[in-house]
Image: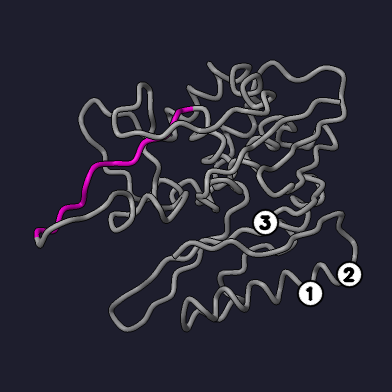
Amino acid sequence: MHNFTINKTGLEMFDVFRAYGLALAISGRYGKYRTSIQDVGYAFKINVPTRSLPTEIDQGLLEEKMEKWEDVFGTFRKREKTKHPKERLKEILEEDYEKILEIHQKPDFMPKFGNRLKDGMTLYQSIDNSASKGFREEKRGYTYSEGTQLKVDKYSWAIACLGAAFFGKWFRSFQGKNSIKISLIPNPLKVLLISHRDLHFKLGDLDKKICKISGTTIIAHYTLKLIRFLATKSFHVKYDSVVFNV
């Protein structure tokens, strides 16, 4: 049995994405292990019942062609000599895979944040609302400024992006000429990852099945559909809330 810790930072969606992302990075595309995630209050504990851990990322995860990569990296603007974040994600998960597992086996590892963080990666608003222009740093005075990008260490960033791409649900609500984008994910109180994946896929493409009059209706309708599946008791999952980002 191997145990991993995702210590909470206060950035709720970022933390949940990291938990799912690390569990997925270990289990691989087809769920090689009966990996479980449990919320213990201050952290998410990930348990992997195996003697030996993988030594490299399952390439199938990186080769998966999903529209959700665009949801995760939608605010990226191509610049000269700047790699697309999907390319950097692939590099990090390939080159630093064992390092990612090693540091998360330490119960005291915390993500590092900073505007000048060495090898830091931009934390996108799609990963957590705290990275948006209005939240990422204190604003003073009457002159508007978007501020500087919020960066996080590349190890935490990589597993958060992986969790967001595979398990986040994105919806867009149109209100006249304006629109809002909402992402949702269930908080894993106690889940078996492979069962969570089954439920996630059974929910399928909800875009045409969800009432999108407003952000509130999207959240409520998604939650009700989730509850209906949970009521069948066919899945080894327990959620205590739905985390959302607008």
Note whether 128 is above or below 228 in the view shown: above
Of the two numbered discs 3 and 1 in the rendering, the one whose residue sits closer to the viewer? 3
Q: Which mark is residue 232?
A: 2
Is residue 146 within the magenta segment?
yes
Is residue 79 shown left or right of residue 244?
Answer: left
Is residue 115 shown left or right of residue 196?
Answer: left
Note whether 205 is above or below 113 in the view shown: below
Is residue 78 within the magenta segment?
no
Magenta residue span? 143-154
Instruction: Please give the name of the residue rendered at 67% of the width and 64% of the height, measured from the top-left corner.
Output: 241
Instruction: Please give the name of the residue rendered at 51% of the width and 41% of the height, measured from the top-left corner.
Output: 161
Query: Nearest the camera: 223 or 199?
Result: 223
First along the sequence among labels 2 and 3? 3
Instruction: Please give the name of the residue rendered at 39% of the width and 77% of the height, measured from the top-left corner.
Output: 174
Q: CA distance from mark 2 to mark 1?
A: 7 Å
Which element is circle 2 on? loop
Say which residue label 1 marks: 228
Q: CB of mark 2 within 8 Å of CB of mark 1? A: yes
Q: CB of mark 3 within 8 Å of CB of mark 1? A: no
Assess disc 3: are there few (<14), some (14-19) or many (≥20) residues with their C-alpha within 10 Å of its C-alpha.
many
Q: Which mark is residue 187?
A: 3
Q: Give coordinates of residue 83: x percent, y percent.
A: 33, 29
Of the two numbered discs 2 and 3 in the rendering, the one whose residue sits closer to the viewer? 3
Instruction: Please give the name of the residue rendered at 51% of the width and 61% of the height, measured from the top-left corner.
Output: 183
Q: Give coordinates of residue 135: x percent, y percent.
A: 33, 55
Q: Quadrant of the C terminus?
A: bottom left
